[in-house]
Amino acid sequence: MKVVEGLKKTVLVIAALSMVFTMSFGMVGTARAYAAVQERVFEPEDEYYEDYILKGTDVPVKDARIKALIEYNILTGGTRFKGTNQCWGYAEKVRRMFGTGGRRTSVQKKTSAKVIFETLRKVRPGTHVRFGYSKTQEAHSIAVYKVTKDKMYFSDGNWDSNNCIRHMVVDIDYFTRYPYLNWYIQPTGGFTVSKTSAKGISYENENKNLVVCQPVTGAKNYTIYKSTSKKGKYTPIATTTKPYYLDKKARVGATWYKIKPNNKSITAPTVVYNKVKTPTIRVNATKAGYSKLTWDAMKGAKKYGIYKTYYDKNYNLKYKRIATVTGTSYIYKGSLNDLAVKALASNSKADSNYNEIYVEKVPPQPVITSIEQDASDNNKIKITLKIPYSCKKFDNIYMDVFRSDSKNGEYTYLTGCDVYGNDDSMYKKSAFDYKTAVLTAYDEDWKSNTTYYYKAVVYGYSTTSEGWYTYQQPGLDSKIVSFTTPERPVIEVKYGDGTLYKYSDGTPIKYVDPQGIVHTEGLELNWWDELIYEYNGTKYMVETDGSLYYYDPSDDTWHYIYDDSYTNNDAGRGMIAAPEENTEEAADIEAEAATEDESVAEEEEVSETSEETVFQTETEPREEAIEG
């Protein structure tokens, strides 16, 4: 029995997976959540430091002066190294910031994560490290700040060539791209600063400014001052032992800072422009078929700029302003385009970053023309729709229908249909005529005498020159249409001497067993039309010929009971009545026992033994009964 049931379960799983595969790939865009498709949301990217990935204050070293010096190098080094010898020259420049001397230490080992870690884990911040293709063919230099077991923190003066400066944190095996670790030079003697200066930067979208100065030898503390103008009054805001400070109360626009080490003169003022927060952009369709861009008002913003993005001949990203608005929305009447939006402050240096978005063509708004019980299959509710104007600008069009139990309630995906563009579409694109085309969808999961609310939305796809589909913005919802369902048809099916009542789609309603007991708990029909129900805490299964089984969870097996009438004991387990021939035999034995006393006792004992044997045999698991 376990083998038989196991085979059935395997077939069910394979069939179910086949159905899932068909549903997943048979139609573009089915089973999508309603709320997720009606509005596309573009969150701003986190662009702290813009051209930099590494923050000096995040380098895992204990000395705050070292953190400050790394930060200062990042803020003052620019994006290109203008000195000589490219990466070598830059690595030497950084090394000399951290110490006045140093000598080369030869390594000449093949690179691996282990070799890099064990060789460089104790080097001083600012160490010049040289990699190569062989022991004699050297290739690339970097300035290393810290090496941990899994990460390397460094600056590179020739990142992606062209003397581009980048400050990075990478996995420790990143530089195994070079076969050899040739040598390194550590800074020695300690750094000295005769005259310190301050620099600062704004944390994007956080209203925070970081101000830092070169660490001064012997300084025990640093006092930070700020002002709203370069020549205005400077007010002390903090005194710290670290040569940097995070101002968490920065206002949008320009803030001027000075730093005073306790043993040196105050620095010259430095300005930090705290940018307006980058707005999140939401894109929806309008009734006219355009794209409406909306965003929240940003503190410090005076206006908002809308831009088209493009690349010049050198593949540099450029922005061309196409509109400026004072409100928080803009209707774009073009078609496919890369756009960007940014908040504009009174000073352009405080403008927000660009939030880049992608705007698609907008498909038409569908119309639900009728909802009725399907004449050819009264188990289905037929929904008829039309598209009111041409949408042939798309290579593929499909439509989803959503349903809710109340007009203003939550709408869930009901069904979808391809209009044209795919092999299984209702129409070929060349034959699609929006004036005559009728679209149909069906609701097969409904209850009798219930009011439902329906709406539909159309989606379009266009293919790129590479043959890929581009994601399309959904069109507007159709108007909501309600429909009250009729009484659903009920079918009676015999299961031996019992009767199953079910809807025409196969959903079971109730089962009346041969004893007239009505069962509604746990009703389900499996793949082979076997009826399963629960009674007194036990699961039973009835086949169409009336054969009955009960389920034992302790061995995960359906046990055969009988194929005729049955009763239930107090525990809820199926029990059978003795077969008729055995009952008659027992009656004859009892009749003979009335005339012969001695024979009666013996015959009664045999009869009891016979009945007990029959009961035990019939209640064995099904496989035992088959073997018998």
Image (tube, rainbow, N blue to C red):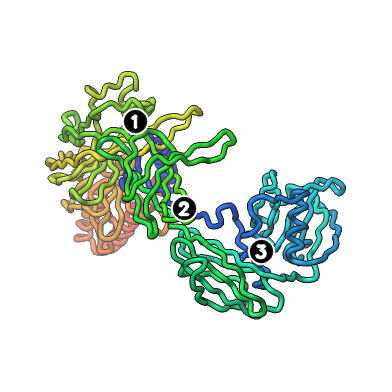
Specify the label residue 397 is tagged with.
1
Residue 490 makes an appearance in the image: yes
Disc 2, SS: helix
**Left or right of residue 411, residue 393 in this image:** right
Q: Nearer the viewer, residue 379 or 407?
A: 407
Residue at 35 percent of width and 42 percent of height: 31
**Residue at screen point 16% across, 51% down:** 516
Residue under label 2 = 348
The image position of residue 144, as x and y in percent, is 72, 60
Mark 3 or mark 2: name the one nearer the start of the chain. 3
Say which label, 1 or 3, has the lower sequence index.
3
The residue wearing badge 3 is 70
In the picture provided, is 424 more to the left or to the right than 92? left
Residue at image coords 68%, 56%: 155
Q: Mark 2: few, some, or many residues within 10 Å (few <14, many ≥20)?
A: few
Estimate the x, y position of residue 76 in percent, counting from the top left. 64, 59
Quarter of the image for residue 330 reads: top left
Which mark is nearer the camera, 2 or 1? 2
**Amino acid, disc 3:** Ile
Image vertical order of residue 257 relative to residue 578, above or below: below
Residue drawn 66% across the image and 57% down it: 77
Q: Amino acid at mark 1?
A: Ile
Type of amino acid at the residue the image marks with label 2: Ser
| Place of residue 588 in the rendered image (x, y in percent of width and height, measured from the top left) | 22, 53
Quadrant of residue 162 in the image? top right
125 in relation to 535, above or below: below
